[in-house]
């Protein structure tokens, strides 16, 4: 005879049965998962330190099924979290334990590529890189290129306003999307934006992009395509001093040069990347810069010459310019593989994401070096230096008691330092669950209330991806107490490794 369930478990089981029955009445049973072993693969996104199991996972195959799931959940007041490939690094797709996870991976069709209008219309589950692959026969490409572009989906890029190494010149997701189509929390169809140069009314497209799935569920996206440059070349510049490298970044932009990519890696990161991919990096350099130019051969030659002059003037100890496409790709391979390379040198790592004024890059690196001693943890650094977007990777071992907690505190101090330097708590990974406390540092209660007001205009009950991005007043008050009392574990309700 089975032992009776504890009251809280019994209540959850009853609610789960209710939700499964309601969904099973409007969508095929085979698209629903609710057994523990079925939902476990969906318990986290790329930020695997935090995990929750949803009541139900729905894997819709059609837009009609998406609408039906949303309508049923809205009727029962069930939270819904949309998920793409699960590559996000801020817990944006962390499930709600009392809700439904809407997994949209089956929406993976490229509907059309229009080479004359230079657009592509794709479903939300299409991989970022697949768009450029489909556009390549027409001499076109999709510009935003996050490091996870081989796996991440355009729907997730919309949610987080993703960038990438070429966003300095070509812009973030918000600058490269014309229209999104999807459904409201009530399951009603909604189209935001348009295919014309301008659309009547407020620019709601900019509000939806980066809203982390809290305003609508996006199922279809129309993106801009750009002509593929005739030529691209990359300079690898070595520096024997972090400050010289940071100053060089500011000097390039101050000279009126907007490179296609301008990335920075410190010495520990270059050592890890070189061991992983053998990109030909200078292992003696305290920092290296990757500075790319693209365009016509004449444009590239002129810009490479100007960048070489600036880098030399700023104290570069070595300069090497790619002489072939294979060599250019090799230079970038280390940067593109920075995260897996870090996984080879540490049992775990915590990837932070913040933005600072580019002139403060060296100040931030020096501040992080001080934090390494304070928290007893190492940190390797890779920056989208051209736009000040930093990605410190804090190394830790989750099997060692207290190390994850120290990594979280280390990360929180990096974000607070970013704000103090005139920056912001995120650049391209989104706020999600990870940085929600840091939003208390950056924004006033009045500003946060305006964020909530915008959210409620789309989702009055706040059931789309609840508990993400915008902190409540109570959470911010508690976060302040945590700082005063010193070291209470953040998010105590979540299971750790």
Image: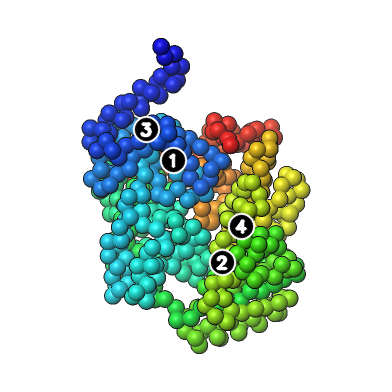
Q: Earlier in the sequence, mark 1 or mark 3?
A: 3
Label 4: element kind = helix
Q: CA distance from mark 4 to mark 3?
A: 35 Å
Instruction: Give the labeled residue for mark 4.
Output: 341
Circle 2 packing at 10 Å, graded few (<14), some (14-19), many (20+), is some
In the picture as drawn, the residue positioned furthest to the bottom comes out as 298
Image coords of residue 116 (percent x, y): 28, 75
Image coords of residue 210 (percent x, y): 44, 53
Quadrant of the image containing the C terminus: top right
Q: CA distance from mark 1 to mark 2?
A: 30 Å
Instruction: Give the labeled residue for mark 2.
Output: 333
Q: Quadrant of residue 21?
A: top left
Q: Earlier in the sequence, mark 4 or mark 2?
A: 2
For the residues labelled 4 and 1, say whether their Cβ atoms are less than 8 Å apart.
no
Is residue 98 placed above or below 464 in the rendered structure? above
Q: CA distance from mark 1 to mark 3?
A: 11 Å
Residue at 38% in and 23% down: 13
Image coords of residue 132 (percent x, y): 39, 67
Circle 1 packing at 10 Å, graded few (<14), some (14-19), many (20+), is some
| Left or right, residue 137 beside residue 280 | left
Residue at 44% in and 21% down: 9
Instruction: Give the labeled residue for mark 3.
Output: 34
Q: Earlier in the sequence, mark 2 or mark 3?
A: 3
Label 2: element kind = helix
In the picture as drawn, the residue positioned furthest to the front comes out as 1
Instruction: Give the labeled residue for mark 1.
Output: 42
Label 3: element kind = loop
């Amino acid at each position: 005879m089975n032992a009776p369930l504890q009251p809280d478990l019994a209540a959850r089981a009853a609610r789960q049965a209710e939700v499964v029955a309601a969904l099973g009445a409007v969508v095929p049973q085979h698209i629903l998962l609710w057994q523990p072993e079925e939902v476990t693969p969906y318990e986290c996104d790329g930020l695997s330190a935090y995990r929750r199991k949803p009541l139900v996972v729905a894997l819709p195959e059609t837009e009609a099924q998406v609408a039906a799931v949303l309508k049923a959940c809205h009727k029962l007041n069930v939270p819904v979290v949309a998920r793409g490939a699960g590559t996000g690094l801020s817990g944006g797709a962390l499930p709600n334990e009392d809700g439904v996870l809407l997994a949209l991976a089956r929406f993976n069709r490229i509907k059309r590529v229009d080479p004359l209008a230079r657009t592509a219309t794709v479903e939300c589950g299409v991989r970022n890189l697949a768009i450029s692959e489909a556009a390549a026969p027409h001499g076109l490409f999709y510009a935003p290129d996050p490091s996870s572009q081989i796996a991440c989906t355009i729907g997730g890029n919309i949610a987080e306003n993703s960038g990438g190494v070429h966003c300095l010149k070509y812009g973030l997701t918000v600058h490269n999307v014309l229209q999104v189509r999807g459904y409201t929390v009530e399951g009603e169809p909604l189209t935001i934006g348009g295919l014309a140069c301008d659309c009547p009314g407020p620019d709601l497209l900019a509000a939806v992009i980066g809203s982390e799935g809290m305003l609508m569920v996006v199922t279809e996206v129309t993106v801009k395509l750009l002509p593929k440059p005739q030529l691209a070349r990359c300079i690898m510049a070595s520096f024997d001093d972090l400050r010289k490298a940071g100053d060089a970044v500011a000097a390039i932009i101050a000279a009126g040069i907007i490179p296609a990519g301008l990335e920075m890696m410190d010495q520990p990161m270059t050592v890890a990347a070189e061991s992983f991919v053998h990109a030909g990096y200078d292992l003696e350099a305290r920092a290296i810069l990757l500075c790319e130019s693209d365009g016509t051969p004449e444009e590239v030659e002129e810009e490479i010459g100007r960048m070489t002059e600036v880098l030399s003037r700023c104290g570069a100890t070595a300069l090497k310019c790619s002489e072939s496409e294979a060599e250019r790709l090799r230079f970038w391979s280390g940067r593109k593989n920075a995260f897996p390379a870090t996984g080879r040198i540490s049992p775990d790592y915590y990837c932070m994401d913040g933005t600072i004024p580019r002139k403060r890059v060296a100040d931030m690196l020096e501040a992080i070096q001080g934090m390494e001693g304070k928290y007893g943890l190492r940190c390797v650094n890779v920056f989208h230096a051209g736009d000040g977007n930093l990605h410190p990777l804090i190394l830790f071992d989750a099997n060692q008691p207290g190390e994850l907690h120290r990594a979280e505190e280390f990360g929180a101090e990096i974000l607070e330092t970013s704000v103090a330097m005139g920056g912001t708590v995120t650049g391209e990974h989104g706020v999600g669950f990870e940085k929600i406390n840091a939003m208390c540092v950056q924004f006033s209660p009045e500003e946060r209330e305006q964020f909530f007001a915008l959210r409620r205009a789309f989702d009055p009950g706040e059931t789309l991806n609840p508990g993400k991005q915008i902190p409540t007043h109570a959470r911010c008050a508690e976060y302040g107490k945590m700082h005063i009392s010193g070291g209470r574990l953040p998010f105590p309700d979540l299971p750790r490794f």
